[in-house]
Image (tube, helix red, strand yellow):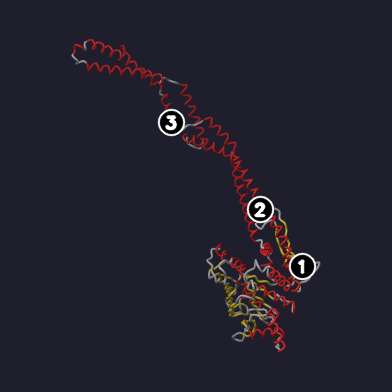
Amino acid sequence: MLSALQIRDIVLIETLDLEFAAGLCVLTGETGAGKSVILDALGLALGAKGERSLVRNGARQGSVTAVFDLPADHPVFAVGDDSGLDLESPLVLRRQLTEDGRSRAFVNDQPVALGLLRSLGDLLVEIHGQHDDRGLFDASTHRALLDAFAGLEGKADAVARLYEAWRAALRAQAEHDEAAAKARADADYLTHALEELDALNPEPDEEDALSAERTALSHGAKIAEAFSEAVALVEEDGGVAGRLNQALRRLERVRGQAGGRLDPVLEALDRAFTEVDEARRAMDEAGRVLKSNPRRLEEIEERLFALRAAARKHGCAIAALPKVHELIAERVAALTEDESRSASLAEAARKAEAAFQTAATALSIERRAQAKKLDAQVTRELKPLKLDKATFRTRIDALDLANAGPSGLDRASFEISTNPGAPLAPLIKIASGGELARFILALKVVLASGGSAATLVFDEVDRGVGGAVAAAVGERLQRLSTTAQILVVTHSPQVAARAHHHWRISKGAGRKNAETRTTVEGLDARERREEIARMLSGAEITNEARAAADRLLGETGSAS
């Protein structure tokens, strides 16, 4: 709630410090005393437009500070967190306005943008008057107010969650389909590339093996010539093996006569014969392998050419072709998987849509039923407020799925007609400020359980009425003050008599007796009696007026 208001150099106010409390707080005074200045100053602290004319004549700067005592779970703190502000209670809103029209805003001594100050102010105070365009006049809040009245917040939250789940499913489907479309655009290329690589079938380290074999084959003639010469040397004159064999046979004949001295010679010759024989067989095998093969050389050249062409096409080395082959095969396989995934995501989106639509439709049915109850209760409140000829209706417009939102499948707005036969129109279309304020009062009394700021301000809600109607206004304000702090600027003694706290606004000469100043003073019980008597009788307070004031105070059970 608003606990303090400090005003410096605003219009006719030089210095003013007010402290407020819970309950019904009224400000009274003669016409032109400056009651509207108090509300203008409060609006300035809440982020309203500031004009240089608000700065007191002769002052270089005006300022307004509003202090609020708030519970820890007040929504204003969440807004502060989202904006990077470190807020705590008491919450102090301060606005400075210079004589040239420049403005600065602060929240708990932290500079903030005017838009943020206004957002915070909207959560703290609702000012209802003829020119107000916020609070109940904002049709975007009406659906939430209806839900609060009907106790449908839980179901509305569930619908909002289902809506977000549906939109998330649609986004997932759209993102996947976009990626799949891009893949399908490359499908022909990928399929053709896979077919080419399947036919080529590149193998790891194939290039090195082919290069080595090609090198050997390209030098086949030189190798064959050298090999022929080597074979000739080994085989001429019967060959090395033949001569070794002859030597062995001759020495074998005299072996026994040598007394064992030829044994090492014979063993060495035998080993030499064996080695030479093995070398001869190896030379025969090598000759067959190293025989010039122009056809094989041509095959190798063609294979290397095909591998290099594929590597250039895919922008990689020949050694990387097997990996490229593997990756393209995976992408082609994924095209089939994409189709299955897309169908799965589409089904999930359909189910999410159906769940949202079912819950939102059920919520719409309940809203329409509860709207009739709200209309009936508001209508009952209108007659005592001299609005018995008026009509109030909660209009609910159905929305199709394309225009649905977190709030469901309908849009709610409050409409009124002040005269029989006149068309229903939004609240803001009412011409009379007094009627407008009383309509808001009736709505606030019915909607007292939800959707309001902690502090409500009514500017001359009793305008144009008196007697029983003014008493009805006062009774409803007092009733409303059990759920919110109420500040009322009033000319009605019936309303003033209901107050828990009472301030009188007056206008007189300033300290230098040269300028007019607005002053505000809190009233005790005796002073309240005199002020209410003045409101009843006018400039001259009579004993009859005092007696009437006593009766009003006694009838209302005023707390003062």
Mark 1: secondary structure: strand
Quadrant housing the C terminus: bottom right
Q: Are marks 3 and 1 in contact (CB under 8 Å)?
A: no
Picture quadrant where residue 424 is located: bottom right
Mark 1 or mark 2, earlier in chain: 2
Which residue lies under the disc numbered 3?
A: 208
Of 50 and 288, the residue lying toward us? 288
Label tally: 3
Q: Earlier in the sequence, mark 3 or mark 1?
A: 3
Cα separation, mark 3 vs mark 2, equals 64 Å
Q: Is residue 308 above or below residue 408?
A: above
Q: Mark 3 or mark 2: which comes first in sequence?
A: 3
The amino acid at mark 2 is Phe
Point out the frontmost of discs 3 and 2. Answer: 2
Above or below, 372 relative to 44: above
* 321 with respect to 140 (left or right): left
Give the residue displayed 24% in from the left and 10% down from the top.
250
Q: Residue at x 47, y 26 (%)?
A: 300
Residue 387 position in % (x across, y down): 76, 72
Q: Residues within 10 Å of mark 3 (few under 14, many from 20)?
A: few
Near-viewer residue (187 or 290): 187
Name the kind of residue labelled 3 in the image. Answer: Asp
**Residue linked to disc 1:** 391
Horizontal and vertical percent for residue 207? 45, 31
Instruction: Provide the secondary structure element on which disc 2 rests.
Output: helix
Image: 271 above or below 12: above
